[in-house]
Amino acid sequence: MSTNINLPKIAFLGIGLMGKPMALRLLQAGYPLIAWNRTRSKAEELVRHGALVASSIVEAVQDAQIVITMLEAGPVVAQVVGVALAGFAAGTLVIDMSSTRQSEARVLHALLRTHGIGFVDAPVSGGVLGAEAGSLAIMAGGSAADFARAEPILRSMGRPTLVGPAGCGQIAKLCNQLIVGGTLNIIAEALLLAQAGGADPAAVRAALRGGFAESRLLEVHGERMLERNFLPGGQVKSQSKDLDNVLLAAADAGLALPLAQQVTQHYHSILAAIPHADQSAILLALEAINPGLRLGKAADRLPN
């Protein structure tokens, strides 16, 4: 796949479940890209699409104008960026697309600013399918100037929106995850209620389509629940982490969010057993508190 030498060189750090299709979208758009991942073999999967692979973080970033991080959590982002500082050129822009705490994004922004490095926090929503399609919702926090540099790159991966200064992208992502986590819980409850009441839950889901209860979550994750397909897209561990961060952000703001607390407890009840299952596995937490009630007859599809 050919690259456009007039486009900025991108270092992409973190070639995981989401990072790989996101990096691939950038390569398809013609951006020269060098990839780094702790497990090198995952980064090497991009070579046939035109990527270079770095052996170290510093090697990845030293010639890059743009550095994108897509990593597991805030402490990992801080560790990787701390190592990368030795390789940053003046004027580099860091775009962190991981899901972290707002406080972590603000600390990272302050650190990078002291080194003359720009920063945008730009977490995403849309899952693996959205990453593959280049249709991610991208919630960005940063200055207008830094966002202007980042926006064309982000548009290769989805729909970016500047929601406020640095750190506000993470607040927007937490709002998204609160809506997603709460809605998945309600969908699971509704399907279980349909079955317990003697209705066909699949038919009930079909009947709800087109009404006020219609949503992308009902379409995609309602089907997952009916099929008992809990192979990972967005994972239980990620949703649990994000909901924990929702409660921390609420506490910092002096807010009481009782529904968020309840949904978080449900996710924690299955976190240790199936951390890598899809977030729609919230259904299993609700079945556990309703002995003898099980949605559908399909066998559970769970990650190994």
Image: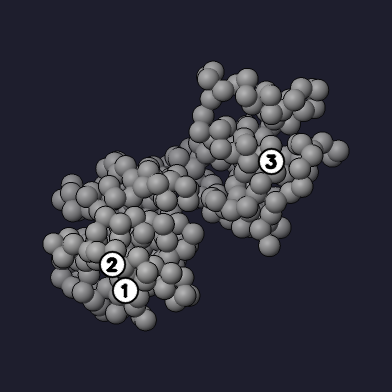
Taking the spot 65% from the left edge, 49% from the top edge, the residue there is 230
What amino acid type is highlighted by mark number 1? Leu
* CB-based contact (under 8 Å), mark 2 and mark 1: yes
How crowded pointer 1 is (Cα within 10 Å; few <14, some 14-19, many 20+) is rated as: some
Q: In the shown orientation, is residue 218 left or right of residue 7?
A: right
For label 2, the residue is: 33
How crowded pointer 2 is (Cα within 10 Å; few <14, some 14-19, many 20+) is rated as: many
- Image mark for residue 52: 1
Taking the spot 41% from the left edge, 73% from the top edge, the residue there is 44
What amino acid type is highlighted by mark number 2? Leu
Expressed as whole percent of the image width and height from the top left, the position of residue 59 reads: 29, 79
Expressed as whole percent of the image width and height from the top left, the position of residue 78 reads: 38, 67
Of callouts 3 and 2, the N-terminal one: 2
For label 3, the residue is: 227
Q: Secondary structure at mark 1?
A: strand
Q: For this rendering, which residue is in front, 167 or 69?
A: 69
Instruction: Check the image and report above or below for 79 versus 150.
Output: below
Q: Secondary structure at mark 3?
A: helix
Q: Is the C terminus in the top left, top right, bottom left or bottom right quadrant? A: bottom right
**Residue that protrudes farthest toward the right in the picture:** 292
Of callouts 2 and 1, the N-terminal one: 2
Q: For this rendering, which residue is in front, 254 or 112?
A: 112
Q: Secondary structure at mark 2?
A: strand
Q: CA distance from mark 3 to mark 2?
A: 38 Å
How crowded pointer 3 is (Cα within 10 Å; few <14, some 14-19, many 20+) is rated as: some
Q: Decide if residue 80 is in sight here.
A: no
What amino acid type is highlighted by mark number 3? Glu
Expressed as whole percent of the image width and height from the top left, the position of residue 218 reads: 57, 32
Q: Is the N terminus in the top left, top right, bottom left or bottom right quadrant? A: bottom left
Instruction: Check the image and report above or below for 282 versus 13.
Output: above
